[in-house]
Image (tube, helix red, strand yellow):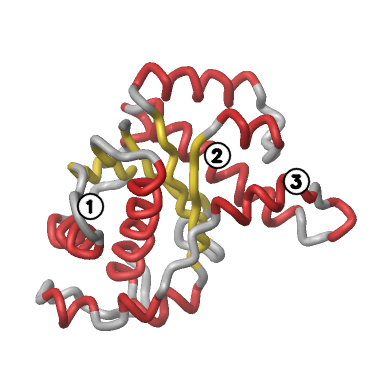
Amino acid sequence: MGILYIDDSNHGNYPEIKLAFFAEDEHAAKKALSWLNKNKHKEITEELLSEMGFNFLVLERWMREMLGYNVSNIMSHAELIRTAKSQYGLDGVIIDGETAHKDILGIERSINGHVPKIQGIAHADQAYAGAKAAGKIAYRLYRHMARNSCPEAVNIAVENELNARKVDPNIVNYQGLATVMGLHIPIETRTPA
């Protein structure tokens, strides 16, 4: 059991990386952040993968356009939480960024079974080492994906492990979310200013 911290990289641009970092407690999160700060090479390495428990979702432009801003966030958070819940067991979830109550309800209703306490906290990455670690890993992952479009530069072991950690949402499950849940979430294609 532990805490899941969710942050993103490349927010508002595409692809956007949503990353969920798991830590057993704040002490473990501080230890992970310290490791990231000491290993500043900004690469996704086999060592980083062996040290850090995380999953990620790649949010593409077409997903935002199909689902709208709010529902695509609900989808990405719910899918990451569901995956981590089955892997680790969770006491709580901290999302970096203020999250509306209706969006937290949407996330909770999209997860089967027990739902850990979910909090959306503005600037959580400044208050929680785990949220800061999630942001740093998300940034490294975004840069890794941007850099590794060249096949000869790819480390097969790293790519295989990343593929195992990638969460692929079933987007069809979320298309009717606003209506089915009665949340009155506007389906819109623009991102907030």
Q: How far apart are marks 3 and 1 (CA)?
A: 36 Å
**First-in-chain label (1 vs 2):** 1
Residue 55: percent from the left, percent from the top? 49, 48
First in sequence, mark 3 or 1: give its number: 1
| Quadrant (top left/top right/bottom left/bottom right) for the C terminus | bottom left
Specify the label residue 137 is tagged with. Answer: 2
Which numbered dot is residue 8? Answer: none
Q: What residue type is labelled 2?
A: Ile
User: Which type of secondary structure does the marked residue at label 2 adopt?
Assistant: helix
Which amino acid type corresponds to the residue marked 3 in the rendered image? Ala
Pointer 3 with pointer 1, Cβ within 8 A: no
From the top left corner, tell me how far across and down residue 150 is, in percent. 83, 60
User: Tag 2: Cα neighbours inside 10 Å, few (<14), some, or many (≥20)?
Assistant: many
**In the rendered image, which residue does mark 1 sit on?**
99
Relative to 68, say whether 138 is above or below.
above
Q: Which residue is drawn at 85% across and 51% down?
A: 153
Locate residue 167 relative to residue 49 in the image: left or right.
Answer: left
- Disc 1 marks which amino acid? Thr
Could you tell me residue 184's position as x and y percent?
A: 13, 76
Between discs 2 and 3, the one toward the N terminus: 2
The answer to whether mark 1 and mark 2 are in CB contact below 8 A is no
Under circle 1, the secondary element is loop
> Would you place residue 25 above or below residue 139 in this image?
above
| Residue ID for mark 3 | 157
The image quadrant of residue 46 is top right
Q: Which residue extends farthest right?
A: 152
User: Which quarter of the rendering shows the N terminus?
Assistant: top left
